[in-house]
Amino acid sequence: MKVFMRVLVFGGTFDPPHRGHAALLLAAAKKIRPDKILIVPAYQAPLKGTPQASSKDRLTMVRLGILDPLPLKWRKISRLDAREARARRRVFTVETLGALKGADLHFVCGQDSAVSFPKWKNPSLLKSSATWWYGARPGASIRPSTHFRTVPGRFPSISSTEIRSLLALDQDCSKELFPAVLSFIHDRRLYGKRMVARLSTTLSPSRYEHTLNVATLAESLARRWGADPVKARLAGLLHDAGRRYSPPELARYARRRRLAVPERAAILALAPMLLHSYVSEDLARREFGVSDHEVLCAIRRHTLGDRRLGLLDRILYVADACAYDRTHATSAATRALAFVDLDAALKRCVSEKLVHAVSREAWLHPLTVNLWNCLARL
Ligand SMILES: [Fe+2]
Ligand SMILES: [Fe+2]
């Protein structure tokens, strides 16, 4: 490589690559005017979980969704660099840039990656080894540190995480993804198909049916009360993912993964099935790639509740208690009430859960008691 050749390095997980990535690269190329462009998909982003799509599939999608749409002028000097994706281990950016030493390096990434820069490996060395650029996402409130320059332009606010959630729910993503990428995802049954297929094979038929019912009701309630319907549906789909396990398996899972469960010893001894919401949250994060805090929180709280519940927490709690498959005498009335007064419906759901538990002389978790005490004051 010629000394001082100007090289634009575009890094990311690209799981999947979307129109925002393509727009950012094009705008960066126009601004930086490089001699060469390297698009470098990561094998695994050091600060994120394992990508849902394989390296091989992501390399193909990057070709279809970032490289191919570039105007010829820029495509001619661009190369898909598979050194990280094919490494079969985490490769740190400092290693990749070290291997490209001798060039005038310009590293371009999205806003989320740029914000996390202080946590990257060896940030001080990194800072001096390239010029750093990021594309600002509308609505993103936290800005990266000052050594980052802004790529001029307005880029779509959608993230790959949100797109994965949309795909999982069979929502239309044609605005976010190029048709070739979308076809590839459908042909390979990536993302969404995987979630629903996995749930249908790991849960019992009745639990799977219940899951779909909760997702549908949670989505409707979210529309009624101004919450995000996609998040509500996602939380509904995954809330009982942990119910694939028996109580002893849940106990083993919680121990092995060292899940932070309040009153863990008492739960393990008295009611291990109550662990399923914590296991579902862990599965949502690890197996299904969910990183949204609100969704994870709602899944975690759907069984025991908590002193303070957010809007999505309340929606999922109620949807779970009075979904269409629930056959208690009061289910239909509670469901109707939930569209008129969500908190009154929540109060009724918690009260019925407590009465049922007391009638069986069951142990009550302090989080549920706390929730009731807060609701009793309303
Ligand atoms: Fe549950
Ligand atoms: Fe449930």
Image: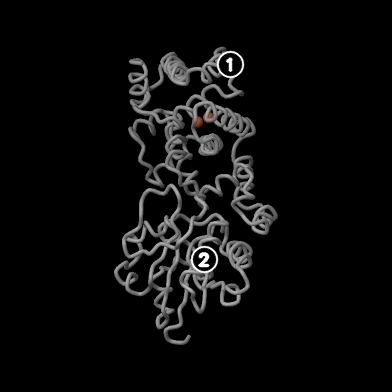
Residue that carries the numbered disc 2 in the rendered image: 41
Mark 2 falls on what kind of element? strand
For the point 46% across and 36% down, the residue is 299
Closest to the observer, 354 or 161 = 161
Decide: few, some or many residues near mark 1? Use Cα within 10 Å; few <14, some 14-19, many ≥20.
some
Asked where in the image residue 265 lies, by quadrant, the reply is top left
- Closer to the chain start, of discs 2 and 1, is 2
Residue 69 visible? The answer is yes
Residue that carries the numbered disc 1 in the rendered image: 332
Give the alpha-carbon distance from disc 2 to disc 1, as whole Å. 50 Å
Depth-wise, is mark 2 or mark 1 nearer the camera? 2
Mark 1 falls on what kind of element? helix
Q: Where is residue 34 in the image (x, y as percent from the top left)?
A: 49, 76
Q: Give the residue type that dot 2 points to.
A: Pro
Q: Position of residue 14 (x, y in %)?
A: 53, 60
- Please state, as top left, top right, bottom left or bottom right, where the C terminus lies in the image: top left
Closest to the observer, 48 or 139 = 139
Q: In this view, does 120 lie to the left or right of 193?
A: left
**Residue 3 sits above or below residue 14 on the image:** below
Q: Give the residue type that dot 1 points to.
A: Ala
Ligand 1 is within 8 Å of the C-beta of the residue at disc 2: no
**Residue 187 sits above or below residue 291 on the image:** below
For the point 47% across and 37% down, the residue is 248
Asked where in the image residue 53 lies, by quadrant, the reply is bottom right
Residue 360 visible? The answer is no
Q: Where is residue 200 in the image (x, y as percent from the top left)?
A: 63, 40
The residue positioned farthest toward the bottom in the image shown? 2
